[in-house]
Amino acid sequence: MHPISVCIIAKNEEKRIEKCLRSVKPYGFEIVVVDTGSADRTKEIAAAYADKVLDFVWCDDFSAARNFSLREASNDWILMLDCDEWIQEIDVEELDYFREHHADSVGAVSRRNLVTENGHYVLNNTDNTERFFDRRLYHYTGIIHEQLTPKNGRELPCLLLHTTIGHSGYDMTPEEQRAKSKRNLTLLHRQLSLEPENPYVYYQLGKGYEIIEDYESACEYYGKGLYFDVDPSLAYVQALVISYGNTLLLTGRAEAALGFAHIYDEFAVTADFVYLMGRIYMANGMYPQAIEQFLQATAYADCRFHGANSFLAFYHIALICEQTGDLDNALAYYHECGEYPPAAERAVRLLRKTAAARPRRIVIFRSGLFILQYLADQYAKALEEMGCELLIFNYFSSQEQLTESMEELYAFHEKGIDAVLTFNNYAFNLKTADEKSLWDQWQIPVFNLLWDHPMYYHDTLDDSPAHGIVICEDRTHVAYVKRFCPAVRNAFFIPAGGEELQPGRPPVPIRERSIDVLFVGSYKFAKDCTFDIFDKTLLEYLRSHTHTTFEQTVEDCLRQIRPDVSEAELKYMIAQHRYVDLNLSATYRLKVLQSLVDAGITVTVYGGGWEDTPLYGNPLFDLHSVISFEEALGLMGDSKLVLNQLSWFKDGCCERIFNAMLQSAVCLTDDSVYLKEQFRDDEELVFYSLAEADKLGETAAALLRDPDRMQRIADSGHSAAAARHTWAHRADEFMKLLQELS
């Protein structure tokens, strides 16, 4: 136990308080919850986690409630949290050091303010807030938007801790925001009557009116707050200036906002202010000055409002370029915005606009492999909907049909080809009669989308055409190509996508679905390969380092034996031992399914190779033959849980994840760096760890016992996948890449 008390005040917070308390519980702090009059299950939930749950009669004074919690805590050192906050990162040893060596200081934490976009949490802004202190030196003042205040009246030092908390308090419906703001405004006006010369109160009043979209009143109060002699170094004063500038723009006073140039030297210490100046110049039609400010904003390492030093600045430069007719630079800057949805949408519109003038002409190669045909068909459908002209080349046809297809290819080329898209190396090295690359002869970029790890194509990638570009579905695979395949012109990451079988049709509720757990996938174990001592070393290492890539493991183990191994030798060894990767994935695939069966869960499986496993014949292992993708989607739409096990992809994904989510099933998958960036665990899907694969049965059983929880996850997962992870999104990414390279 650490001599620290976490104090929380609460009222009717049954939907949010458990996440907060669950994040605190592991650290051994005393937890004190002060309830100010809840009429829901808040106190019941708190009692399961907190050391003290106390009642406080509400008196329209937040400071009074907070100070009550301080008095009731058992420890002098306090970490203050709200119910809509949770610990994301914390260094407990640093807190102990702070208590001993900075006893007269306040510790500030970084707060990541999150809001929901398309069912997915995104960062709105970040601020630093004073939360860790000695109650003997500090207390709270102010009836609302209370401030931590030294008891002796002297300002004491504030230091930023390596602690980060998430905050969803701004993630409300417009109705909830208005109701909360109206309550707050009443209290703020009462506080203003007590402190008529406190600029902080004017700042909070401005925020309150801005939330309810009364921008005239917000602008008035922000302006009044700046009448006082304020300190530009204070965080709230910097926020006040930026908020005032925003409301001047919102109320059509762009010309008046130009006056901010007079305070530029004092406030241009943050990307947020410089970004604001860019918007002010832009609103006044001063485009060169605006672009200069936006570019300058991107030079700052940090910002309070998420994107002010990155995608938002680039987005506004792109808007200026588009408005002035510089469409090439507009697209380039939209692409700099990453996954910012408005930029992506405008980029697609621009691409379609240029495609309408002359549609992109693309050749897509379909091979005989089941999965590769599916990929080709998904890209073809999405690209065709974008207005592209396509030639589909079936690479698995008879010799006579291949001859006809080649004739069609040459005829298609007569009107120009913008790109070739192929999969897993098929036709990537298509040669002419004189053994030269056809694509180089035609000077056409050929995109080779690798469904598998590039180590399986180490030899053919060495013969890449000069115009050859590799697309990988894992970011570590991109790094592999760039490191070990110098013949490839470039490599890029475009993840897999998903499709909804019956878009617009209401999904079957989780409770009414007939399949508890579905797994669509085969068991592929290379049993004919001879495993030597080095293979066994790799297996042992990977089993204890389940988040390490296969190629990194080969390098680590090999350098222990031969520190001076060359790049060429390393590449050879990775390729020679690649079946360890295949067999390890198969081993874990078997392990996770065994865990489910051992937990008494019936698993419905469609795939081949399972006859050679111990699960074959088990009554809970409901095995069926291989099915089409369309049939699989239909089954996912009748499944509660859809299991996924990645093929040792540590920074990528597979289509099964998105397909499951788009059929409104709960996806249960091992994690990757990319997936953890995209989705919230237990909110949009459920992650499991390969290191604890034997516990998967417990996880699945708990989910199946709680259909309401599964329904929430399924609904949120569907929204998140539909917003960002369909094949249409992947085709958009491909077209952006093509545009950039053009």
Image: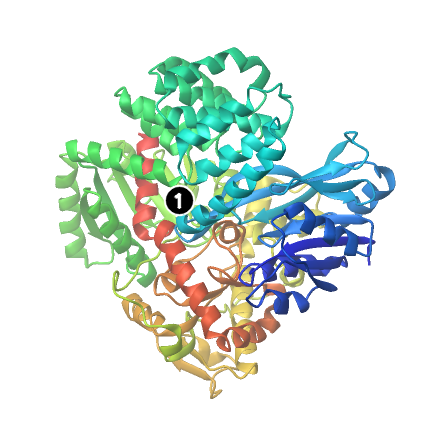
Element class at badge 1: strand
Q: In the image shown, does 378 or 720 lie closer to the viewer?
A: 720
436 lies above or below 324: below
Label 1, residues with CA under 10 Å away: few <14, some 14-19, many ≥20? many
Q: Position of residue 249 (x, y in %)?
A: 39, 24
Q: Is residue 137 visible?
A: yes
Q: Position of residue 491 (x, y in %)?
A: 43, 39
Q: Position of residue 322 (x, y in %)?
A: 29, 25
**Color style of the picture:** rainbow
Furthest-top residue in this view: 262
Q: Is residue 87 left or right of residue 675?
A: right
Label tally: 1
223 lies above or below 169: above
User: Which residue position is annotated with label 1?
Assistant: 471
Question: What residue do we see at 32% from left, 57% from top?
Answer: 372
Question: Which image quarter holds the C terminus?
Answer: top left
Q: In the image shown, does 159 or 70 lie closer to the viewer?
A: 70
Q: Position of residue 460 (x, y in %)?
A: 41, 46
Q: Is residue 488 visible?
A: no
Occupied quadrant, residue 492: top left
Three-letter residue code for mark 1 = Ile
Furthest-right residue in this view: 100
Q: In the image shown, does 389 or 79 lie closer to the viewer?
A: 79
Q: Is residue 499 left or right of residue 614?
A: left
Question: What residue do we see at 58% from left, 34% from top?
Answer: 193
Occupied quadrant, residue 27: bottom right
593 lies above or below 459: below
Occupied quadrant, residue 735: top left
Q: In the image shown, does 98 or 252 lie closer to the viewer?
A: 252
